[in-house]
Image (spheres, grey):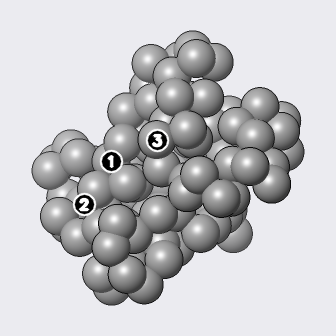
Amino acid sequence: VSVKDTIPGTPAGKRMKSYIAAIEKNNEQALLDFINSNFSPQDLAGRPAKERRAINTNIPNAIRGAKFIAVVESRPTFIIIKFKTKNNEDVNIGMECEATAPFWLADVFRN
């Protein structure tokens, strides 16, 4: 089962699918484009995409080439997905969106 087929069509799910697609492209510009398209202009004014990308290098590195395991938790504006890395480690990646449309990303995290 493909991760993209399993992720729900909620606001958080749609953003997660876009994030995974950007990671799979394996290029820096795709990740910057994702950040610029998914965080609010106000958030980006406070911390531009390049700064956000520099802080958040571990998530793409952890799940690139990893095997999708399951959607652990899903609500309209929140999602956690579990992957199994090449080193056989479990990695959970999560997203939280703002509560109102257009549901900008509020947080991307690994736990």
Residue occupied by mark 2: 7
Against 111, residue 50 (above or below) is above
The residue depicted at 58 percent of the width and 17 percent of the height is 29
Mark number for residue 97? Answer: none
Against 12, residue 73 (above or below) is below
Label 2 near label 1: C-beta < 8 Å? yes
Q: Earlier in the sequence, mark 3 or mark 2?
A: 2
Distance from label 1 to label 2 (Cα)? 7 Å
Badge 3 marks a residue whose secondary structure is: helix
Q: Observer-nearest residue: 102 or 32?
A: 102
The residue depicted at 30 percent of the width and 81 percent of the height is 76
Q: Quadrant of residue 67?
A: top left
Question: Which x, y percent locates residue 54?
Answer: 83, 35
Against 21, residue 39 (above or below) is below
The C terminus sits in image quarter: bottom right
Disc 3 residue type (three-letter) = Ser
Mark number for residue 17? Answer: 1
Badge 2 marks a residue whose secondary structure is: loop
Residue occupied by mark 3: 37
Question: Which x, y percent locates residue 84?
Answer: 52, 50
Mark 1 nearby-residue class (10 Å; few <14, some 14–19, many ≥20): some
Q: Which mark is nearer the camera, 3 or 2?
A: 3
Horizontal side, residue 54 vs residue 96: left or right: right
Badge 1 marks a residue whose secondary structure is: helix
Q: Earlier in the sequence, mark 1 or mark 2?
A: 2
Disc 1 residue type (three-letter) = Lys
Q: Quadrant of residue 79?
A: bottom left
Disc 2 residue type (three-letter) = Ile
Distance from label 3 to label 2 (Cα)? 19 Å
Question: Which x, y percent locates residue 83?
Answer: 48, 54
Horizontal side, residue 89 vs residue 103: left or right: right
Distance from label 3 to label 1 (Cα)? 13 Å
